[in-house]
Amino acid sequence: MSFQTIQQQAKTEWELFDRPDRFRILVGSATCGRAAGSQEVIEKFREELANRHLLAETDIYEVGCLGLCYAEVLVEIQGKDGRRILYQSVEPRRVADLIDAQLVQGGIYEPLAMACTQSETDTSIPAFSDLEIMQSQVRIVLRNCGIIDPTNVEHYIARGGYSGLARALQMSADQVIEEIQQSGLRGRGGAGFPTGMKWSFARRTESDRKYVICNADEGDPGAFMDRSVLEGDPHAVLEGLLVAGYAIGADTGYVYCRAEYPLAIERLQQAIVQMHEKGLLGANILGSNFSFSIKIKKGAGAFVCGEETSLMQSIEGKRGMPRSKPPFPAVSGLFEKPTNINNVETLAAVSAIMEKGAAWYAGYGTEKSRGTKTFALAGKITRTGLIEVPMGISLRTIIEDIGGGVLDGKTFKAVQTGGPSGGCIPAQYIDLPVDYEHLAEVGSIMGSGGMIVIDEASCMVDMARYFLTFTENESCGKCVPCRMGTQHLLNILTDITQGKGKPEHLDTLRKIGATMKNGSLCGLGQTAANPVLTTLTHYEDEYLEHIDNLKCPAGACRSLIHFSIDAAQCTGCGACSRACPVDAISGTRKEPHAIDQQTCICCGSCRDACKFEAVLVS
């Protein structure tokens, strides 16, 4: 079957998806949407539509994540007038109201209306592109997420999918690599190594067998970029994997995905079946001499398997532990054959680059950091979610304009980029451009794209301790600097947060961190000390308060704080009492309350619940 025929079939299917004579309902049903109740919302739509005899003329689709996690469950409704309205925070009890307002009466259910997806259709609510969270975004990797049915390959093809592969097959492998090099794409898995250069190394290695691998082992706390792309647009990633295979001369690809992502794995399995049916996978793809197969390998959740040599060990059935380099994977990788490994976001960008060209992609970003980057906005931020922005955008734009600022109007204190291997960037750098070079200048990294916002109520010593708890637990233990270094760092940080710190501990932390950076075998150990070293650099005064004065300025370290209630400020509303998990607060309504110090566990729930600043921390 020719690609032109495949495209024509997809166009026909897309016309059925976008029919003007039927109602259409799109429900965000990636993992985040499902956790918020999307499946129950869908069932309620079917029930209420049936009650109104509208089910036969309505199409309901599950789509991926638009990235607006703070507004889940997201529902887009298109009436027969062509007007498409995006609704937020939809619950089953509101479904009948949505149907009656828009499908029956032809209006809008304004309490939940978030945006029109086309500005010319309605001026009473913003256009989708006018939403503050979307205004500074450029969606390349996320181009189809929340827009198409991810289980329907026709939808992907109708929006340009696999045209990049078809174009690549008309080029030589060297020309494909040159295209990627000209785009300026750098690996989005963390290190930022030029993708085209990486491919060229594997291309030049002579071998009877080569492999390409998609690294979908996303293990950073607070990161969900790869999961969302795989759930919302799996074909974009698989197409990129095929292009990579063609470029280096491989005939087999692996997708290494953590087993904790069952929906992503299900989407991948469905996509691979559809690719075979379309002749996009298997022997002589699209009539060419290129043959390729894809296998899915489920990871067991070890964070260290995000490191490429550990990942390959796991695929081979061995314990996931890093190997010494050289030889590098491009020379001796999976099963000792030349291997290229890229992460999910990199491969999704590859398919877009091959479709629209290197110059188009290089038009975004900065001179040394081209294109866009996805980030998972989490922590103390008003609008949590998945975003994609041009490289070089400022932290201020991301946090204030896109993210809506710090939650509950509190003061911005820092942002952790790069996950547990990254660093804490203090508020003084809020205008810092976000690219590989500028993040490195302040001691942090891009990483895979986690971005955790920290407010004034967070303790930086405790934050460093939290991340070391994770990396110490995830260290494979193969090399001494990482195995012992993470343990000693964690023990010292724990002592400091418990009031057992000593002034000499600060120098010890720095020495251990430097040793880990210089002596660890893989990236986990080399970067595990980053949260400690960056917080020491920017927040040494906070460490000294813990050590010298036995105080936690943020009121977060339980061993160093004491909660009490200011009787003059307390209104007796009872909010603190209701929030306390151990019933340590007593008092009658409209009278000052009190905290039983023997029962109090210093969790801070009362402080968070109080609206009158009556809870004191000392």
Image (tube, rainbow, N blue to C red):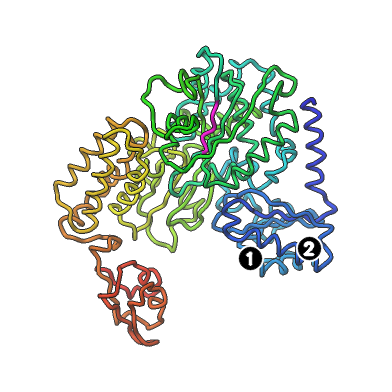
Label 1 is placed on what type of residue?
Glu
Q: Nearer the viewer, mark 1 or mark 2?
A: 1
347 vs 430, left or right, is right
User: Tag count in the figure?
Assistant: 2
Which residue sits furthest top?
Answer: 206
Which stretch appears magenta? 212-216
- Say which of 396 and 259 sits in front: 259
Task: Specify whether 310 is left or right of 390.
Answer: left
Q: Quadrant of the N terminus?
A: top right
Q: Split into 4 quadrants, where in the image is the C terminus?
A: bottom left
Residue 451 highlighted magenta (yes or no): no
Vertical side of 264 occupied by 206: above or below:
above
Residue pointed to by mark 2: 103
Label 2: how many residues lie within 10 Å, few (<14), some (14-19) or many (20+)?
many
Front-lying residue, 618 or 115: 618
Please give the label number shown on residue 178: none
Q: Position of residue 321 (x, y in %)?
A: 39, 33
Secondary structure at badge 2 equals helix
Dot 1 falls on a residue whose secondary structure is: loop
Residue depicted at 17% across the width and 47% down the height: 505
Look at mark 1 in the image and give the residue it sits on.
Answer: 91
**Rendered location of residue 489, percent (x, y):** 25, 45
Front residue (pair 79, 367)? 79
> Residue 612 at x, y = what percent?
37, 75
Magenta residues: mostly which secondary structure?
Answer: strand
Disc 2 residue type (three-letter): Leu
Give how far across and how far down residue 436 sits, in percent: 42, 34
Q: Label 1 neighbourhood size at 10 Å, few (<14), some (14-19), many (20+)?
A: some
How far apart marks 1 and 2 lie (CA) works out to 17 Å
